[in-house]
Every structure is written in C-alpha cells, then in structure tokens.
Image: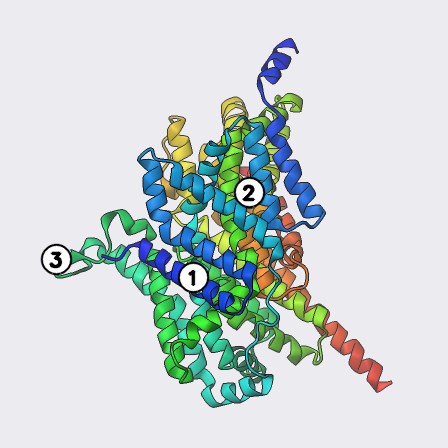
C-alpha cells in the first residue's frame, strides 16, 4: 500500500544526500542543517507515534533539534548560483531538445491530477490483487502521494530526455536546495509557531482586546471589526485557518450572527476570504510569499508580497462590501 | 466597567510579546528562522509552559506539517530540466508565439489555476512546479517582445507578478472546493455551535469574491502590460526625434 510516509522518506533521502555532499565539500553548517532536517523527516512518524502513546521524549528531542536548526540558519550563506552550465550550453541544449523539454515538467501536474482523480473516482476498487493501492486512512493524503509519484516519474523522464545519468537528478536537486536554504524551513516553523500561539492563548487575548472598544450596537462596526480582525490575525499567524475560529468565537457568532442576524453560511465563507487577503500580505505565510521570492531569485524577500499587496487590498474591499450587502439580507 | 476590568485581569497578556518579537525581528532583518523560533519560545515560556513541554509542542507541530516541504521532491527533475535548457526553451517558444501577449498568458494561467483549485487540485501548480521553470521565463520573454532590453528591476517585477498571479489564483479557487480545508473547517465550526450547514451552501458563497479576484488580478496584469507598452512607445518616439 502506498502511504504518505514513503514521500517523507524520499524527502529525507534527498535532504540526507544534500547534507552528505556538503559534508564532503566541508560546508559544515550547511551539512549539519540538512542532515539534522533529514533525521527529523525520516524519524517523524515514529516521533509522533511515541508522543501520541504518552512518551514525549522523542518529540522533546525534535524540539531541541529545531532550536539547533534555528541557530544554524544565520550561518548558511545562500548558494552562489542556481544556474548550472554556461548560458551557451543551455541554449544549445534547448535548441536540440525543443518541446521535448516540456514533457517531464508537464508530467508533474498531469500525474498528480490522474492519481487524485482515479483515487476519488475508483476509491477502494483501486487495488493490485487483494492489496488496496491506498490505505483507507490515507485517502485525504492521496493528492500529496500523487505529487510524490509524479516527481519520481518526471525525474526518470527528464533523465531519459536529456540523456543524463539518473544520479544527476539528486545533484541538481541539491543545488536548488542549497539556493533555497533556510527559507525552505520557514513554512513548517510558522506552523509550529501557530500551534504555540494557540496554546499560549494569543487568540483569546486579541479577541478580548477587540471586544473592549467595539460599539456592538452597530452592525457595520461589528462587520468591519470582524473583517479587519481576520486580516490582522492572519497577518500575525500567517494562516487564515488559525484566525477563523478565534474571530468567529469573539465577534462572528455572538455579535454578527446572534445580535445582528447575519447569515451563517455567507459569514463563514466570506469571512474566511478576508483572512485569505491577509495571507497575501504577510511574510508569515512563508510558503506562499517568501519561498517563491527565493525560488525566483528576487533581491528582496518581500518582492512577491509587494507585487500582490494592491490585489489583496482591492479584493478585500470588494469582499467586505459584498458582505455588507449580502449578510443582513432576509 | 468594573466587570470588564475583572475579565481583563484574568487574561495573561505576556504571550503577546511573541508577536512583538516577530514584528521587531522582521523589521530589524534578523534571520527569519531564528526570529520565528525565538518568538515561539518567548510566547510559550510567558504563557507558563515548561521547557520540556514547549520543546515537545514545537517538535510535534513541526513534524505534523511535514507536507509543506513536499515541493522539494520536484527539485531534482526541475533542476535537471533547467540544466538541459528548459527555461531558455520556454523563452524562445514564447517569443515565437505572436498572439500570446503578456496579459493573455498571465490571465490564462490565472483562470486555469483558479479552475484547478476549485476542483481541489492545488498541488498541480506552484512556485517550484510551474512558476520558476515555465511561467516566469515565459513572462520575461513576453515582456521582451513588447520592450526589448528590460532591466533587472523590471525583470524581477515580472517574476514577482507571475508568483502573485499564481497565489491569487490558488487562494480564490481553493475556497470553492467542497471536500477540503476551508469549507470543512467552516462547517465544523458551525456544527460545534449547533448550526448545521451543507458544504455546498458554504462553498457557493465564495464564488462572487472568486470572480472579483479574477477581475482585479486580470486588470492589474493588463495595466502592467500597458505600462510596458507606453514605455516602449516613448522609447521609439525618443529615437525617431
């Protein structure tokens, strides 16, 4: 049976390979960084299982490893160049291979799509003999498993088309990984920070602070406070999903639905979208805003945020006006 | 007033310092990884968590979101293709397609990304999978057709716009998808409050804003193209005189 764990082991293998190559090149900090992360990825399921069984020591060690990664991060210099070979070589190769170069790149979305579609259409009929292809508890993970399968297929195709040895794949992957560096880690760390914030009651504090100055008798004031709260909270946490329950419990349910009779379906749906506008504005949503800036080799880490700030504000304005028009209509 | 004061004294405000650490760290340009971990430690300790507890919480939530690093699996294939000239080919191909302007390319991508996200396929495109190897070089080539010899700053702006378009398309498509993430979270929240809602009734209400997002981003892309065009026109007029 295919499980998401296989994908995590593949990631661990690539990280481990990058660490070892850096070790051989005496890039000590970078080697330690990738190797530590590789161990975290490889042992992740065991750590989570131990923690769930009431043995927190491995999870505590993992937390210690994360602190070590944070101390290593400032010592990582960005890799020199993310381009391999001379421009002339790449131009010549591009002219020789032509459209065939697109094929492996398109295989990634295509196979992901096929796996996801066939799993949702065929479900448990997807089996080899009596073995189901996907475990029942893994069905929500199928698109991710599909992505991992697609990446392996794309690597094979890319090696075949460019007539390169297969081992060049990990080597090129490691080159890109060194370019991305610590930015790759931010999305996971921010997720962990979100958990700590929730645990420390940061949400309740902000909800109680908004509650003190709000003129609750005005539906418009409540709506604006809710929308703005969703945006600000999302900007702080980097994730609209973390903001939603807090703002709903603080303002949405008691004031908008309870006091002013807002329609719950519209409030939920469009309220969440206020948060999505916040996601477009914040460096805390690192996987959408900071990682692409590094991948696209922008000089400023905030280049992507700058490019989408105006869109986010305009969409937010339209969304809030729509809410005002639709929420209290009966 | 007294009542409000009473409620307040029960709330521990100190964990907010974690938020301050984040803001200060980003403003002072410390390494973001270090800033985020420090903020987590500060907030947790001020909320009264013990160090072992806090480390376990960090470790557990970090490991539970491992799927966020999934994109690194695309890197070997993409790296190999880039070495073989994928980006160069995307650029050359783009410069030969006369009907495909910068705005048409980005708006077409935006539409496709939104539609795919609406049926739950958010993972098929992204910064690593599609923007860096395909969309960004094609955008640069499309802009070169309008105005040859763009500077570095303008090229960065184009690449950033490509990434922004990818984000807007994904965000304002995925909220319409029934069986994942946002819709289920909203439904679950209301169920906990004793209000039963069907996923469809929630998902449908994100359609108006999805359309608005498409129109707004398309307009911005079109304006970017028009600015390039005007700069190019001004340059040719300057040469003619």
Question: Does B152 appear above or below A141?
Answer: below
Mark 3 vs mark 1, CA separation in Å: 35 Å
- Per the image, the residue denoted by label 1 is A16
Please tell me which residue is depicted at 39% across the width and 81% down the height of the picture. Answer: A165
| Residue sitting farthest toward the left | A130
Q: Which chain carries label 2?
A: A
Is A305 on the left-hand or right-hand side of A52?
Answer: right
Kindly indicate the quadrant of the structure image that contains residue B97. Answer: bottom right
Mark 3 vs mark 2, CA separation in Å: 45 Å
Question: Does B103 appear above or below B28?
Answer: below
Residue A275 image label: 2
Please tell me which residue is depicted at 87% across the width and 85% down the height of the picture. Answer: B241
Please tell me which residue is depicted at 64% across the width and 64% down the height of the picture. Answer: A298
Observer-side mark, 3 or 1, equals 1
Instruction: Pick whichever, A166 or A2, lies toward us.
Output: A166
Q: Which chain carries label 1?
A: A
Q: Mark 3 lies on which chain?
A: A
Kindly indicate the quadrant of the structure image that contains residue A288. Answer: bottom right
- Per the image, the residue denoted by label 3 is A130
Q: Can residue A102 be seen in this view?
A: yes
Is A275 on the left-hand or right-hand side of B177?
Answer: right
Helix, strand or loop status at disc 2: helix
Instruction: Pick whichever, B181 or A295, lies toward us.
Output: A295
């Amino acid at each position: 049976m295919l499980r998401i764990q296989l994908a995590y082991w593949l990631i661990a293998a690539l990280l481990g390979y990058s660490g070892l190559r850096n070790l051989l090149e005496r890039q000590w900090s970078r080697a330690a960084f990738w190797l530590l992360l590789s161990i975290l990825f490889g042992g992740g399921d065991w750590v989570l299982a131990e923690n769930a069984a009431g043995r927190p020591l491995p999870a505590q060690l993992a937390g210690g490893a994360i602190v070590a990664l944070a101390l290593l991060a400032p010592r990582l210099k960005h890799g020199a160049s993310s381009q391999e070979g001379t421009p002339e070589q790449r131009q010549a190769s591009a002219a020789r291979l032509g459209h065939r170069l697109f094929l492996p790149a398109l295989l990634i979305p295509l196979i992901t799509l096929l796996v996801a579609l066939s799993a949702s259409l065929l479900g448990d009929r997807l089996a080899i003999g009596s073995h189901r292809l996907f475990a029942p508890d893994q069905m929500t993970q199928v698109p991710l498993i599909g992505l991992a399968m697609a990446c392996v297929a794309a690597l094979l195709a890319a090696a075949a088309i460019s007539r390169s040895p297969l081992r060049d794949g990990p080597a090129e992957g490691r080159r890109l990984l060194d370019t991305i560096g610590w930015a790759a880690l931010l999305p996971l760390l921010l997720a962990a920070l979100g958990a700590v914030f929730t645990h420390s009651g940061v949400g309740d504090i902000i909800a109680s602070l908004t509650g003190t100055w709000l003129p609750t008798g005005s539906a418009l004031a409540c709506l604006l406070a809710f929308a703005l709260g969703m945006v600000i909270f999302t900007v702080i946490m980097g994730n609209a999903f973390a903001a939603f329950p807090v703002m709903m419990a603080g303002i949405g349910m008691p004031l908008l639905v309870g006091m002013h009779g807002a329609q719950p379906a519209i409030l939920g749906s469009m309220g969440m979208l206020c948060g999505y506008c916040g996601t477009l504005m914040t460096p805390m949503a690192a996987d959408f805003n900071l990682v692409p800036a590094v991948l696209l080799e922008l000089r400023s880490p905030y280049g992507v945020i700058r490019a989408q700030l105006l869109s986010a504000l305009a969409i937010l304005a339209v969304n809030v006006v729509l809410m005002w028009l639709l929420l209290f209509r009966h | 007033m007294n009542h409000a004061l009473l409620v307040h004294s029960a709330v521990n405000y100190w964990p907010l310092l974690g938020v301050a650490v984040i803001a200060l760290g980003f403003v002072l340009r410390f390494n973001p990884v270090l800033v985020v971990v420090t903020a987590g430690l500060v907030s947790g300790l001020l909320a009264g968590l013990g160090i072992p507890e806090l480390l376990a919480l960090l470790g557990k939530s970090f490991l539970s979101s491992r799927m966020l690093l999934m994109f690194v699996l695309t890197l070997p294939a993409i790296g190999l293709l880039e070495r073989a000239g994928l980006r160069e080919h995307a650029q050359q191909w783009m410069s030969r397609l006369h009907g495909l302007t910068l705005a048409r390319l980005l708006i077409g991508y935006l539409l496709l990304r939104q539609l795919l996200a609406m049926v739950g396929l958010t993972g098929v495109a992204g910064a690593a999978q599609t923007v860096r190897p395909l969309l960004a070089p094609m955008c640069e080539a499309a802009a070169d057709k309008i105005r040859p010899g763009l500077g570095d700053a303008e090229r960065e702006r184009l690449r950033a716009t490509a990434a922004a378009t990818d984000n807007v398309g994904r965000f304002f498509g995925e909220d319409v998808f029934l069986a994942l993430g946002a819709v289920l979270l909203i439904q679950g929240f209301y169920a906990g409050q004793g209000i039963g809602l069907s996923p469809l009734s929630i998902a449908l209400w994100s359609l108006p804003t999805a359309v608005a997002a498409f129109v707004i981003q398309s307009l911005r892309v079109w304006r970017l193209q028009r600015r390039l065009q005007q700069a190019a026109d001004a340059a040719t007029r300057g040469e003619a005189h």
